[in-house]
Image (spheres, helix red, strand yellow):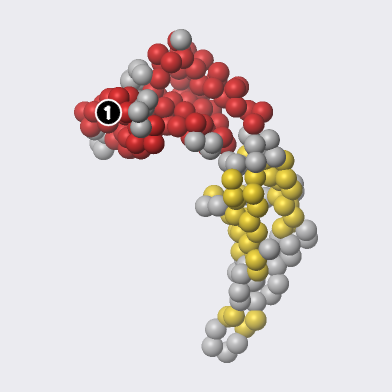
Amino acid sequence: MQGTKLLVLLGVLAAAPAAADIDNAKADKLFEEALKLRSTNPTQACAKFAEALTYNPQAIATHLNVARCDEDQGRLASAAAKYREIIDRAANQKQDDYKAEAQSRLDGLTEDIPHITLWFRTAAPEGAKVLVDDKTIEISGRTRIEVDPGERRVVVTAPGRVGWVSTLVIAKRDDKGVELPELATAQVSSRKTIGKLTVI
């Protein structure tokens, strides 16, 4: 199949300027090693694809394989984000085959991507920061985001407030709402601010 062939090609954004830290030789070597391992040891192959990308972030085919690894390992939102990036890069470079492959992969998983919607019960406190796992989320009204299936951790912090954390389990196609509570004011003593994370 054309899509399968695309995954074994080493595509480079030729028009992009070469970065000082790009090491094409090392990236190519890791890429070839990953291809050989893909059928016998997918986990190790994915690790090598990811490492290859650090030596040449401009290689579209490596991006495509890393995205495919995310998809195969169930990280659907992560895979979708990478496929969208590949589509944009390939379109800019007129790499129609890569664009078509990434679009096809994205179309095939879109319906399975779970979502969560976040909103504050009351006005967000000044300086509030919302994290979903390790990603900062900008909240505006009801904010709906894609997430990977599995256990997700939502954390809310703000200066002078007691932090809040909630853990929820997300399955494919889930669409859950998470109301972010009003954060209590932290107790202040003469020596230090005392506040513990509220766990839900």
> In screen coordinates, is 69 left or right of 185?
left
Q: Residue 99 location, x and y as percent?
A: 49, 18
Q: Up-down: is 181 above or below 3?
A: below
Query: Residue farthest to the right?
Result: 122
In-image side of 137 versus 119 (left or right): left
* Quadrant the C terminus occupies: bottom right
The kind of secondary structure element at disc 1 is: helix
Q: Amino acid at mark 1?
A: Glu
Q: Quadrant of residue 7?
A: top left
The number of numbered discs placed on residues in the rendered structure image is 1
Of residue 5 and residue 85, the one placed in the foreground of this image is: 5
Question: Where does the image place residue 197, in percent across and percent down from the top left?
Answer: 61, 69
Q: Position of residue 154 (x, y in %)?
A: 62, 55
Residue extending furthest bottom? Answer: 190
**Extreme-front residue of the structure:** 40
Q: Is residue 195 above or below residue 131?
A: below
| Residue occupying the point 47% across, 28% down | 68
Residue 177 visible at all: yes
The residue sitting at 60% across, 22% down in the picture is 107
Q: Is residue 145 visible?
A: no
Q: Which residue is mark 1?
A: 33
User: Picture quarter containing residue 155?
Assistant: bottom right
Residue drawn at (59%, 45%) of the image: 150
Q: Is residue 95 left or right of residue 165?
A: left
Q: Position of residue 83 (x, y in %)?
A: 51, 27
Q: Against 196, is 96 above or below? A: above
| Quadrant in which residue 37 is drawn | top left
In terms of depth relative to the viewer, which is nearer, 128 or 79?
Answer: 79
Identify the residue at image location x=58%, y=80%: 193
